[in-house]
Image (cartoon, grey):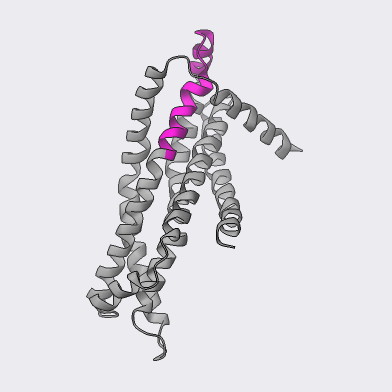
Amino acid sequence: MNWFFHLGRYFILLRKVFRKPEKFVVYRTRFIEEVDSIGLGSLGIVCIVSLFMGAVLTIQAAFNFTSPWVPLYAVGVAARDTLVLEFCPTIVSLILAGKVGSNIASEIGTMRVTEQVDALEIMGINSSGYLILPKIIAAIFVHPFLIILSMFLGLLGGYVAGVASGVVTSYKFIYGIQYQFLPFSITYALIKTVVFAFIITSVSAYHGYNTHGGALEVGRSSTKAVVYSSIIILLFNVILTQLLLS
């Protein structure tokens, strides 16, 4: 029953979040601030993780393709499909759930326990819309760019690692990346990215917005935000894969 309680309260919060804003100018300024915080603030970790994971996936693929019947360009195919279909949209989103989600929950949770949210309500401002809506829109806007960058850097890291270690030639790796490439793979990845961006921001904001108590409860809300965001992302990953690829 506790799940139904939180699910109902979550959708009630979303209804308040998407209520018509009082002043679009204020929300536009908040949107730009959130794009800088969510997007540029996550750029470093996305770049580092993508480069190294692309390198690891390429070396592991080359190590496992030991049969003479498997062409060498299959290393590029395996790295491309793994990065584009699963690693970049899902694993990077899980990493962003830890980085962005905990930040959102702790920020809003701190404002709640210090009564800043109550002050906004007293001034007649839709506090949930003012605090949460710009974060959701900014994440939906900027996360696809982060994932596209992650794909490029993952393939670049795989190319450099594969050629430098001698497990695959430059020509074979590039040929493997191009071999029977389906443009829908990018569309599929970006659809998942948008859904995951909404989940990360809305679930994290929900836990932060409903924080009560003190600093200890803010920490607990931050932890819950990361855990539940990650679980829901994995759940929707299965659902979207079944719907889009079946």
Q: Is residue 10 above or below residue 20?
A: below
Q: Is residue 187 above or below residue 198?
A: below
User: Going 47% across and 14% down the picture, which residue do you hit?
Assistant: 22
User: Going 43% across and 28% down the picture, which residue do you hit?
Assistant: 134
- Seen from the viewer's position, the closer of residues 128 and 227 is 128
In screen coordinates, is 49 left or right of 212?
left
Question: Given the current orientation, which residue lies at the most extreme top position?
Answer: 123
* Residue 96 colored in magenta in the image: no
Which of the 4 quarters of the picture holds residue 81?
Answer: bottom left
* The C terminus sits in image quarter: bottom right
Q: Is residue 193 above or below residue 179?
A: above
In screen coordinates, is 117 left or right of 92?
right
- Seen from the viewer's position, the closer of residues 113 and 187 is 187
Q: Which residues are magenta?
A: 115-140
Q: Position of residue 186 (x, y in %)?
A: 42, 57
Q: Position of residue 59 (x, y in %)?
A: 35, 74
Q: Position of residue 164 (x, y in %)?
A: 22, 74
Question: Given the current orientation, which residue lies at the most extreme right position?
Answer: 1
How many discs appear? Answer: 0
